[in-house]
Amino acid sequence: MSDVTTRALRLLALLQSRTVWTGPELAEELEVTVRTVRRDVDRLRQMGYPVLTSAGHGGGYQLGAGRELPPLLLGPHEAVAVAVGLRLTAGSGIEGLDAEALRALAALDRILPPSVRSEVSAVSEAMGVVARPVPGARSEVLLALATAVRDGLRIRVDYERRDGERSERRLEPRRVLSVEGHWYLFAWDLGREDWRTFRLDRMHAVHPSTFPITPRPTPDIERAVRESITVAGYPIAATVRVLRPAQEVAGQLSSRTARIEPDGEDACLLHAGAENLRWLAVHLALLGAPIEVIDPPQLLEEIRAIGAWAQEARPGV
């Protein structure tokens, strides 16, 4: 294989790996001049690969959808099988595979011919098992977000809040997470100038851009997302010490209900949110473990009130 052919295949692989490349970036990766990159791009176009060019800030080279799939040489039926399989894997709940499957699906979707993409959508809609693992999150939303995270690009989202109010949010996405079948996006909110967690089932549309995200210190993403869905989203936040090992307590609770933090070998801290303290007190009682109320103190009053009610219970006559 000649150096020119090898370089062309390498260029094609680079164009598939992310949405937009500038000429100097490709030249640096291929260790050639920008002029050589332009010639290699022309060769790819002559071979039938639709390499698009956009000018201005955030512009560059990108691979469009073509009549044939690039080097994998998948046929239409094989491409459908791979795409549907990746969607199943993305919602399988198997640790570590969901994010990888989403990235692979995003890469494949970008270069599928229109006819094959339509067939994938038709099969997905016809098979309930494909949509079931990710309730409420549309595939186009998942793909757009996964692509933006992979490429490090800003997005605009038509988002509906918990109270039903809709607004446009300008975001810098960092990660898409699946927590017990529910999908969330962790992103920097440019309007609020803070990290936020967004539910994908409340996203009506995602509009990608070509503008790169701004590098900034990122917190522990999984911890931040769990905190937002178990505590921050509720009007009341509570912390109690449960006098049982963290692993034992975590096995009794859904990860979307509370966040468990080890506190020595035989105790743990339970962080949870609630609409009212009485309901939280009832759920703590179901644990059947001794607890110490740290915050708020009113929770202890609710627990004692339940105890007093239980003491007054009498058998029927």
Image (spheres, helix red, strand yellow):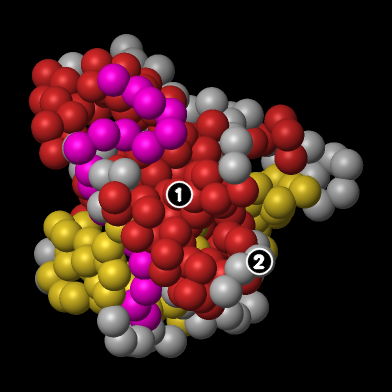
Asked if the magenta segment contains residue 86, the reply would be: no
Q: Residue at x 54, y 26 (%)?
A: 94
Residue 211, x across and y down, in percent: 37, 78
Asked if the magenta segment contains residue 62, the reply would be: yes
Give the residue pinned by disc 2: 31
Indicate left or right for 34 with 120 as reference: right
Relative to residue 298, is residue 58 depicted above or below? below
Residue sitting nearer the eye, 40 or 215: 40
Q: Quadrant of residue 219?
A: bottom right
Residue 58, x across and y down, in percent: 36, 80
Residue sitting nearer the eye, 284 or 125: 125
Indicate left or right for 63 with 28 as reference: left
State the CA–CA distance, disc 2 to disc 1: 15 Å
Q: Earlier in the sequence, mark 2 or mark 1?
A: 1
State which quarter of the image contains the C terminus.
top left
Indicate left or right for 32 with 142 as reference: right
Residue 217, x across and y down, in percent: 64, 78
State which quarter of the image contains the N terminus.
top right
Give the residues drawn in magenta, as a range.
58-75
| Three-letter code, disc 1 | Leu
Label of residue 12 in the image:
1
